[in-house]
Image (tube, rainbow, N blue to C red):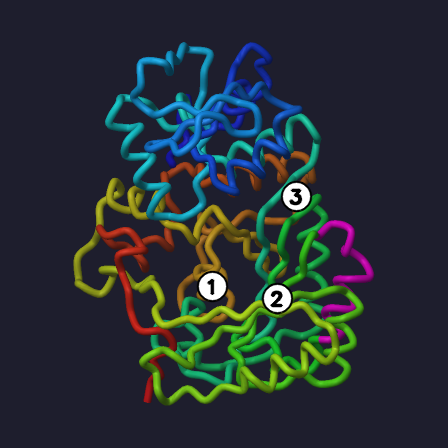
Amino acid sequence: MKRNNINNLDYLKNIFCDETNRFYLYGTGKTGEDFYQQMNHHIKIAGFIESTPTEKQKLGLPVYKWGDSDLKLTVKDKIIVTVRTAKFRDEVENLLLQDSLIKNQHFIFYDVARRIISFYKNHIFWLSQIDLTITTACTLNCRDCIQQIPFIKNKRHLAIHDIIESIDNTFRYIDYCEEFHVVGGEPLLHPQLSEVLEYLGTHYRTNIDTIVIVTNGTILPKEDLLDALKRWNVRVEISDYRKSSAKSVTQKVDEIEAVLKQHCITYLLRPMTEWNDYCGDCNDGTVPSSDALTATFDICPCAGQTLSIHGQKAYICSRSSVAEAFGLTEKNSGNAISLCADTINTKEKLLEFSIKITERGYIPYCINCHSEKPIYERIVPAAKQME
């Protein structure tokens, strides 16, 4: 979103700090329930909204059908969209836009709302997810890798002191995150992964709800890593490609599951047959307009959900983080926020950046992912190997 008289922190702050405003949550699923439980003592939540309600009440509040005469909204009533899936978020947004409602004035997405409320009412900079890339080495060579690993010429492990610098810079500004993801490449290839987890756990475990390791399921964790995983209650997420069309992928999913169970380590198996194609239309030779790039950025599920930290920079897009750090694209200050300045001012800049408000309405790296189609309509086989 391009910064203007509506899309800025002061305007959004006033929405949630105005005690006379009432809020309706669009969505009665788990995301709506969780948001209510977390935020109802900070803002006045008057009810729920659904496109097709299946119940009349939720958590003791009325459930309205969108468009019904019973739902009489005033200028003091705002809608918080509590829908997580990208496709359904777009559907709700389009429905509200068709009824002449304005984003960030009449309706706001729940993740934006939570960050604003947490920052200005609890004085906590809260994020749902932080990504930290520790290596570009990988055991696979996936054509459509979101991190673009096959295209990095000089693959390497980040030095432990550089990783520690990134972690320290992160928590200099971020007070709390729900999930801290340690990723690659394949993070289990990094010879000092257990040390990374020890440092993260020792210094910042109370700032994180869940530490997550994302692995492609091709490497059995070693004993020192298993100890660190258990000590710091790390969740291991295993990408399972056994049912994908990528027949050349050899995994050790069963063996890894058995080892994790034996050591009482939490894990999550993620079967994947398809991926989203982040390349979009960027290779068709056309130069997209600013409006087209803004539209791409606005509907991108990658940007805005996660901050990727690398050294002294925070990126709203993990692809741009890896591309800049490992030489796939020229560095551009518009893709990141520097983590070297005054803490309070940087926190506010970082907060605004994290909710997708920029000077241009997009980031320069968007030209590499531009497409007129939303990401959930761009499907490719999972883990298709390059020769």
Please determine whether, in this image, residue 159 is positioned above or below residue 232: below
Is 270 inside the magenta-drawn segment?
no
Q: Are marks 3 and 2 in contact (CB under 8 Å)?
A: no
Q: Which residue is mark 3?
A: 341
Q: Is residue 112 above or below residue 87?
A: above
- Disc 1 target residue: 324
Q: Going 45% across and 41% down the picture, which residue do you hit?
A: 356
Q: Element at badge 2?
A: strand
- 352 left or right, relative to 387: right
Foreground residue, 295 or 286? Answer: 295
Residue 202 spot, x, y in % from top left: 82, 61
Circle 3: is it few (<14), some (14-19), or many (20+) Cα within 10 Å? few
Q: Is residue 241 left or right of residue 234?
A: left
Among the two numbered marks 3 and 1 on one chain, the one whose residue lies closer to the N terminus: 1
- Vertical placement of residue 271 versus 319, above or below: below
Q: Residue at x 67, y 45 (%)?
A: 174
Looking at the image, the residue that sits furthest to the right is: 202
- Alpha carbons under labels 3 and 1: distance apart: 21 Å
The amino acid type of the residue labelled 3 equals: Ala
Labels 1, 2: front one: 2
Q: Position of residue 104 (x, y in %)?
A: 42, 27
Q: Could you say which quadrant of the image residue 109 lies in?
A: top left
